[in-house]
Image (spheres, helix red, strand yellow):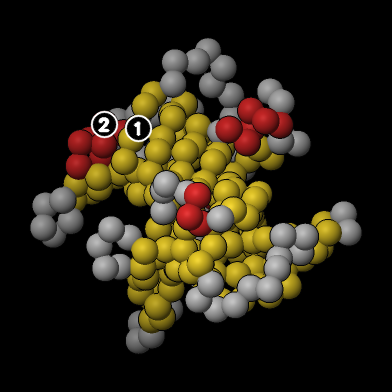
């Protein structure tokens, strides 16, 4: 599979407003990368504040509140925290575009493999939810581990699928605040990033091959 096909496995379009200016993150092969945040409006009044990684070569005179159009990929990477490895998530910018040229505000398309048993549950209000972790192949023998959440009939559809099943999915990237218990008397607010699925299709393939380390995917959260 060539690099273009890998890129087609993971495609994100975002249109939003810059809420945090780029701050230096790391350098790869002499190219500096920065982290920033973009607010993306939902169809409701809620806003998703999403982490973005961008090359120094794409940064211009950004200002807080500037509207921005992004074409890229949703990626994961491991971050060592004390003695535990966390799976961190970010939108990697491939291209900055005129937001007026984008017909979608927040859209993601993925082709990947289920790499943990789906977790099905219902809310106190009876809404059906299923958590699915997808391994999406990237070039140079790398993979991104991306948490997805399915609702209603999509939740019922994916709950019985097994590890290794190949899926083609569409949806949007969202942020979600939750309370993390630290000890018996303390908790803190954290932010999780995930893909809310609107479409799920099983891919008929005889090449259901995936390679992942279980210890790499035990946590899917970002501060």
Q: Nearer the viewer, mark 2 or mark 1?
A: 1
Q: Residue furthest left?
A: 125
Q: How many other residues sit within 10 Å of disc 1, few (<14), some (14-19) or many (≥20)? A: some
**Residue at 35% from the left image edge and 86% from the top image edge:** 185
Tell me if label 2 and label 1 are in contact, CB under 8 Å.
yes
Q: Residue 155: x and y, percent?
A: 26, 39
Which residue is under mark 1? 200
* Left or right for 73, reference 13: right
Vertical comparison of 42 with 157: above or below: below
**Residue at 50% from the left image edge and 49% from the top image edge:** 101
The quadrant holding residue 207 is top right
Q: Is residue 193 visible?
A: yes
| Front residue of this view, candidates 223 and 200 | 200
Q: Is residue 176 visible?
A: no
Element carrying mark 2 = helix
Vertical comparison of 105 with 150: above or below: below
Vertical comparison of 16 with 137: above or below: below
Q: How many other residues sit within 10 Å of disc 2, few (<14), some (14-19) or many (≥20)? A: some
Q: Quadrant of the N terminus?
A: top right
Which residue is under mark 2? 157
| Front residue of this view, candidates 64 and 147 | 64
């Amino acid at each position: 599979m060539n690099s273009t096909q890998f890129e087609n496995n993971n495609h994100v379009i975002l249109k939003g407003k810059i809420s945090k200016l780029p701050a230096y993150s790391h350098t790869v092969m002499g190219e500096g990368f920065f982290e920033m945040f973009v607010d993306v409006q939902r169809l409701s009044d809620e806003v998703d504040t999403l982490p973005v990684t961008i090359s120094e070569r794409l940064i211009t005179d950004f200002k807080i509140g500037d509207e921005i159009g992004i074409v890229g990929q949703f990626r994961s990477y491991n971050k060592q925290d004390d003695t535990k490895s966390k799976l961190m998530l970010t939108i990697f910018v491939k291209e900055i575009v005129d937001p007026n040229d984008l017909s979608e505000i927040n859209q993601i398309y993925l082709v990947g493999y289920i790499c943990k048993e789906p977790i099905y549950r219902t809310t106190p209000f009876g809404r059906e939810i299923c958590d699915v972790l997808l391994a999406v192949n990237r070039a140079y023998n790398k993979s991104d581990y991306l948490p997805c959440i399915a609702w209603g009939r999509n939740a019922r559809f994916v709950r019985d699928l097994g590890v290794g099943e190949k899926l083609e999915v569409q949806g949007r990237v969202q942020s979600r605040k939750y309370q993390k218990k630290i000890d018996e008397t303390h908790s803190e607010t954290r932010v999780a990033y995930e893909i809310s699925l609107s479409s799920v299709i099983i891919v008929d393939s005889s090449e259901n091959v995936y390679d992942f380390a279980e210890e790499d995917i035990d946590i899917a959260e970002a501060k």
